[in-house]
Amino acid sequence: MNWKKRFDRRAEFAKMPERACLQANGILIHPIHSDYMVGILLLMHEPLAEAFMTTAMHLFEGEQERIEAIDVKADQDICDVNRMALDAIGRLDDGSGVLVLTDILGGTPSNCCHQLSVEHRVQVIAGVSLPMLLRAITYRKNDLETVIEKALSGGKNGAVRIDPC
C-alpha cells in the first residue's frame, strides 16, 4: 500500500477518537495500526549520516525500517541535496511524518531543511547526537511530536560530564 493510501486510512481512524489512539504514560500510541512509524532522515555532512546509521544498526542489531542517510559532500549543489532529501521523505513517510536529523545549524544540510519543514509532517532537529537518534528510533511508533520530544530529551540527557574517579 502506498504512503498516500496509508495516510488517508490513518485520517479516517483519527476521526474516531475512541478507537484511534490510546494514552499510555502520556505517550500517544496507535494500537490499531502498529505498522505506522515516523520515518527518520539523517541529513549531515559526509561521512556522519552513514556513520550514525551504521552505529544505530549495530546497536539495534540489524537493519531498521524507514531510516535513510544522506551524506552531503563539501562541494555538493544545494539543489541536488534538496532533491535527494525530498525523494527520501517520499519513501519514508507512511502518513506518520518524517523527522530529519541534521548535524549543525547553519551548515548546508540544515539550510536545506528549511524548505523541507514547510509541510507539517516533516520536522527538523539540528545538533544530532547518538543518544538523540537512539531515542528517536525507540519511540518512533508514537506520533511525531512525541518522537521529537523524546529525541530532544535524549540529546539533552545524553550529554553529561564524567568526573574522574
Image (cartoon, helix red, strand yellow):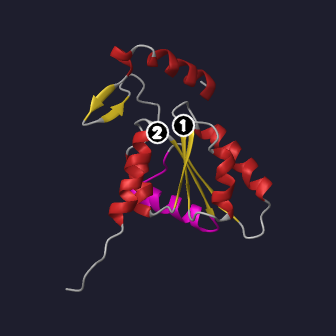
What secondary structure prevails in the magenta region? helix
Q: Name the residue beneath numbered marker 2.
A: 144
Amino acid on which disc 1 is placed: Gly
Q: Name the residue beneath numbered marker 1.
A: 97
Among all residues in the image, which is located at the extreme bottom? 164
Q: Local crowd at mark 1 within 10 Å, few (<14), some, or many (≥20)?
A: many
What element does badge 1 sit on?
A: loop
The question of residue 2 being in magenta is answered with no
x and y percentages locating residue 141 in the rendered image: 41, 37
Amino acid on which disc 2 is placed: Leu
The question of residue 49 being in magenta is answered with yes
Relative placement, left or right, of 27 versus 120 is left
What element does badge 2 sit on?
A: helix
Label 2 close to label 1 by CB (< 8 Å): yes
Which residue occupies 43% across, 60% down? 58
Numbered range of the magenta stretch: 45-64
x and y percentages locating residue 106 in the rendered image: 63, 64
Dividing the picture into quadrants, the one containing residue 1 is top right
